[in-house]
Image: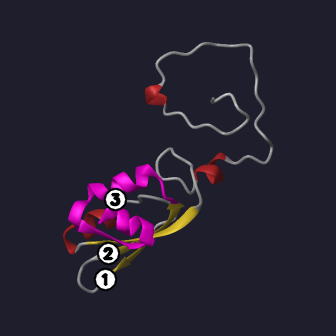
Amino acid sequence: SHRVHAVRTFKVERIEDIQILEDTYSIPPDFDAIDYLSSSWGIVVDGEVETIRLKFSPQIARIIAETVWHPSQVQEPQDDGALIMTLKVTNTIDLRAWILGWGEEVEVLEPAELRNLAS
């Protein structure tokens, strides 16, 4: 249940109804929302942070390079026009769906588990 003493993330667009209650909560003084979300891809914060390395084809390298997809991203243009992107994020279903959406234009270099999933 979302009432357990843990951080919960809800997508605003999915909230269908609200009620004002008498219940209260306290945000721990050491909680930093930006820090908490910094390793997530999308709204899901789950699992350990991993180094993800992706190689994008020359055909879409420019499109990828034009956008800040994640604050941790480091881009390395390649001599052949391809682009290698390194991310430090949690390996979530949102990230996997984004990678798979690029089809054959992206190759997962690391980690091996994600590479096997995407191939």
Distance from the alpha carbon under mark 2 to that under mark 3: 14 Å
Q: Secondary structure at mark 2?
A: strand
Q: Are marks 2 and 1 in contact (CB under 8 Å)?
A: yes
Numbered badge on residue 6: none
Image-based side of 117 in relation to 46, left or right:
left
The answer for how far apart the CA atoms under marks 1 and 3 are is: 19 Å
Disc 1 or disc 3, which is closer to the eye? 3
Q: Residues within 10 Å of mark 2 (few under 14, many from 20)?
A: many
Q: Can you name the residue that lies furthest to the left here?
A: 59
Q: Which mark is residue 78?
A: 1
Residue tagged 3: 99
Q: Secondary structure at mark 3?
A: helix
Position in image of residue 106 (x %, y %) = 28, 67
| Amino acid, disc 1 | Gln
Above or below, comparing residue 55 to residue 3 in the picture: below
Residue type indicated by callout 2: Leu
Query: Which residue position holds label 2?
Result: 83
Tell me what residue is drawn at x 52 percent, y 46 percent.
44
